[in-house]
Image (tube, rainbow, N blue to C red):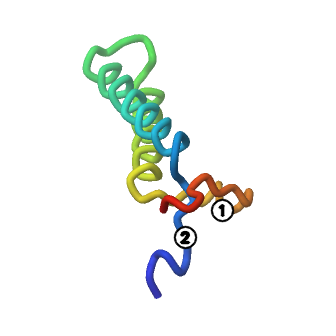
Amino acid sequence: MGMSDVLPRNVGGRDRQLRFVAGTLLIVLGVAALVAGTGLGGTLAVMLAAGGAALLFNAVTQRCLMNRLLGIDTCGENC
C-alpha cells in the first residue's frame, strides 16, 4: 500500500505556493528568533519553525491530512 492509497494528493495551485512561502518564512523566523535570543522565547521559536516545516512538507508532498478531513482538494487536474 503506497502513500497515494492512504492520502491522495490534495494540495496544488496557489495553495501549494502559499504553503511554500509561509513555511519558509516561519522556519526563517523561528530559527532567527532562536539564534538572536529575541523575546519570543525558545518554545515559541521552535513552534514557529515546526509549523513552517509542516507547511513546507505539505507543499512538497502535495498532501495534507486536514484538507482530506475537511474534503478540500486544491489540486484539480494538475496533480
Residue furthest front in the image: 77
Position above or below: 4 against 28: below
**Is residue 67 shown above or below 19?**
below
Circle 1: residue type: Arg
- Residue 28 x %, y %: 33, 27
Residue, disc 1: 68
Nearer-N-terminus badge (2/1): 2
Q: Residue at (47%, 57%) from the top-left corner? A: 62
Quarter location, residue 56: top left
Residue 65 in picture, x, y percent from top left: 60, 60
Q: State the residue position of label 2.
A: 8
Residue 18 percent across, percent down from the top left: 49, 36
The tally of labels here is 2
Residue 61 horizontal/vertical position (percent): 41, 59
Instruction: Determine crowd level at label 2: few under 14, some 14-19, many 20+ residues with C-alpha closer than 10 A.
Output: some
Q: Which amino acid type is shown beneath numbered disc 2?
A: Pro
Nearer-the-camera pick, 49 or 60: 60
Q: Which secondary structure lies at badge 2?
A: loop
**Which residue is found at the position 32% from the left and 24% from the top?**
34
- Is residue 45 shown above or below 37? below
Which of the two residues, 31 or 17, is positioned nearer the viewer here?
A: 17
In percent of the image, x 65 and y 55: which residue is there?
67
Apparent side of residue 60 relative to residue 73 in the rendered image (left or right): left
The residue carrying pointer 1 sits among few (fewer than 14), some (14 to 19) or many (20 or more) residues within 10 Å by Cα, namely: some
